[in-house]
Image (spheres, coloured by chain):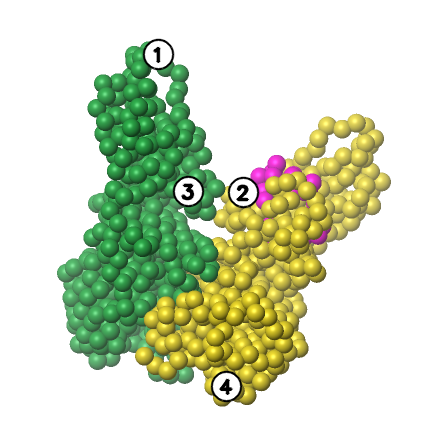
Chain colours: A yellow, B green
């Protein structure tokens, strides 16, 4: 058996702590699987705590993560500090420059600086690994880069944020509104005190930008991701979705074609028959479509100490076993620069919920506006109502252009008979 | 870029043909991803055909696969001949002995001779790869050996045979009987002319034996797999399953504990809420449970030219890129010899369908027999009937021991009031 691989963990929060725990609990197993021992030689975190004392016997504890870069004993640094800039970025840059490999769970960092970090890694020959950055415990990065390597992948999509999926599931099951469920999720620890990254779709967008780069062999382009979160999804819409045979999911969807690169994150109506429709609660699901393999879906826990650490340690295992894959699936120089397709060019089906005061001709006006914008209705749902009362009118459309749809809805909103802002959710039929 | 990897394909049937096609169509992509070209230098098949002519320009065609072993240009041989013995086995043995790597889709070969072939590969340093042998296009072997390497895996199960899943789905959707649907599946090419390996569960057992060895780090033990197929599943049982909130699936299930190794293949009643319940038609699904990652499920096409070839070429890609994993996840010498747990020791819930002639006291007798064997009923379903008429009585049980259940059913069958053989299906609540 070869010499041990020396690993240091920078950042002993949730994921860093889980990593330390696996390296301790499954040490023998890992050594047998990797052909050599994985030795935790140091940890770095300025906030000392004793939660991991049982796993840290003989392990050096530093306050300053950057000091790990200078330690000649350290082969691999696990970056579980977080944040797209600051110390995490500095640490990764310095370590890779020195030829030390980096394993990170930091999606924000990779989404924003993955290209620059890959360049440093390519130059020094160090490994930059980030399985834990996308979909937690699901080994989706390995699957896309290696398991599906024989395929031209043209579409990748999924439920990439467990917090949002949990909130949407709770809203559906209990009929409660977003704000109420979010508060409860925060109390239970399923949502952060500042939930912005999760509920506004940014976290999903980080992961999608990474996934689409790896899947399509194009540059990471976070800035062009169209991002909408779930704050605007109401209990009413969830109820209508149920009635119409849909589930509402926050999806990240990426496709590539001659037109360019589509990357969009927004709430979707997904038919109950879709493979991802039954994925509920904190679970994540990722679907990749390849020209030979057809469709492959992976489902698992997308967050949490133990599943995310499982992915971190898988990356360490690859380094220990000497398995290397190109960071962004192909060399940096071969990455395509795919032009982003603007969201206005999107073509799809739509769910529209209007609040209409029942006046003679109101519906005729709405129908005329839709017709004038080439939007053809598929179904209309309207409850019995009293004349003059505002009632919800729900309609679904056949395929229409996003720009037409937006303009039509704007004109519909300006009608006297239409109260409140119309609510639009895109329908995705997989 | 390094020198090209020279590949030969032995057996130009479905999977071999698909492999040739990918190597041709996605050659540039593969070269970028692997860091070197993959060059198809020869094919071997005694049955000449021209279906692949567009992909075989300049490729040598041999009749005798064994001749590839002697060709000094060949680095990797793809074995897509099939069969657990005969030429396929000879070819793999000879190639591995020579230090040539083998990529195979042959589950029967690996289930029966995987240990012996691994020994030869370990000695010569050649790679023996078989991603395509389990669940077609789903990269489950890579996921279990590498992606989940940080985990002690204690359970792995799934829908591993697309033919059976297609038949069961068709039976449910159309209400037709097994024989009728099988015949149609054969006409459509979803089932072989001799369907034994598929419908009798042997193919699932081959795959399960491989999966459980890789997941648990124990020797491949095909002979101890408990195998039942789907011939005995009737349209009536599928209808009752529906009514009770279950789907009937042919599952392969493996668990390991202090008691030993459980490997069983049989039809199961799976609650509709289970993640694998909605997996229908020719799709496969594999679920692995690890101590850190919790549950990961992968879904995809388990057979067919293109998906299976996708897995074959993924293995070739690993060899081209220099990525190596231990054949059976840990060195042969470290594999555990886990004693098989006999099926009689199984504890679980059961679905029992009896055909009972309504006589006074008939049900009292049945209930008494179950009570005397420590089997406690959970639910009973009985339609209205005319006295003296034979009617189905369906009951589900709480957890009971397989041996007790078998004895109880034997005694129930011997009752005068019970016509026909009772039908028993195990319930699995995931």
Q: Which portion, as a residue range, is magenta? A: A230-251
- Quadrant assignment, res B227: top left
Question: Badge 1 is on which residue?
Answer: B386
- Label 2 sits on a secondary structure element that is loop
Of all chains, the one bearing label 4 is A
Residue count near mark 2 (Cα–Cα under 10 Å), binned few <14, some 14–19, many ≥20: some
Instruction: Name the N-terminal-most of marks 2 and 4.
Output: 4
Question: Badge 3 is on which residue?
Answer: B429
Please report the residue visible at 85 percent of the width from the left and 40 percent of the height from the top: A416
- Residue A84 image position (x, y, % from top left): 64, 73
Residue count near mark 1 (Cα–Cα under 10 Å), binned few <14, some 14–19, many ≥20: few
> For this view, does A42 lie left or right of residue A393?
left
Asked if one can make out residue A323 in the rendered structure from this viewpoint, the answer is: yes
Q: How far apart are marks 1 and 2 (CA)?
A: 41 Å
> For this view, does A208 lie left or right of residue A415?
left
Label pair 4/3, CB-CB below 8 angstroms: no
- Quadrant assignment, res B45: bottom left
Where B303 falls versus A422 (above or below)? below
Question: Badge 2 is on which residue?
Answer: A272
């Amino acid at each position: 058996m070869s010499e041990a691989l020396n690993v240091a963990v920078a950042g002993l929060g949730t994921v860093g702590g889980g990593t330390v725990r696996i390296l301790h609990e499954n040490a023998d197993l890992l050594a047998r699987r990797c052909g050599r021992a994985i030795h935790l030689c140091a940890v770095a975190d300025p906030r000392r705590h004793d939660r991991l004392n049982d796993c840290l016997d003989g392990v050096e504890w530093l306050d300053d993560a950057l000091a790990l870069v200078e330690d000649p004993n350290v082969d691999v640094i696990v970056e579980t500090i977080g944040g797209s800039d600051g110390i995490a970025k500095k640490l990764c840059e310095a370590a890779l420059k020195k030829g030390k490999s980096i394993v990170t769970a930091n999606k924000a960092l990779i989404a924003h600086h993955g290209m620059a970090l890959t360049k440093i890694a390519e130059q020094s020959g160090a490994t930059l690994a980030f399985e834990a950055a996308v979909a937690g415990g699901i080994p989706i990065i390995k699957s896309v880069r290696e398991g599906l390597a024989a395929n031209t992948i043209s579409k990748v999509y999924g439920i990439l944020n467990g917090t949002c999926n949990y909130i949407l599931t709770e809203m559906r099951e209990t009929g409660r509104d977003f704000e109420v469920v979010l508060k409860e999720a925060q109390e239970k620890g399923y949502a952060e005190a500042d939930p912005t990254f999760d509920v506004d779709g940014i976290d999903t967008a980080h992961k999608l930008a990474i996934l689409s780069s790896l899947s399509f062999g194009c540059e990471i382009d976070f800035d062009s991701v169209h991002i909408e979160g779930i704050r605007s999804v109401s209990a009413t819409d969830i109820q209508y979705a149920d009635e119409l045979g849909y589930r509402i999911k926050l999806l990240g969807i990426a496709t590539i074609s001659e037109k360019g690169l589509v990357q969009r994150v927004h709430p979707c109506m997904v038919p109950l028959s879709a493979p991802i429709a039954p994925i509920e609660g904190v679970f994540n699901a990722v679907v990749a479509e390849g020209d030979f393999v057809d469709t492959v879906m992976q489902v698992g826990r997308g967050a949490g100490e133990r599943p995310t650490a499982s992915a971190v340690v898988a990356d360490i295992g690859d380094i220990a076993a000497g398995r290397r894959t190109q960071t962004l699936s192909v060399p940096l120089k071969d990455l395509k620069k795919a032009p982003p397709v603007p969201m206005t060019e999107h073509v799809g089906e739509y769910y529209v919920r209007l609040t209409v005061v029942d006046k003679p001709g109101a519906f005729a006006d709405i129908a005329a506006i839709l017709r004038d914008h080439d939007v053809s209705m598929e179904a209309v749902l309207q409850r019995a109502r009293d004349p003059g009362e505002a009632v919800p009118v729900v309609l679904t459309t056949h395929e229409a252009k996003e720009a037409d749809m937006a303009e039509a809805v704007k004109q519909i909103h300006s009608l006297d008979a239409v109260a409140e802002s119309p609510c639009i959710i895109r329908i995705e039929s997989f």
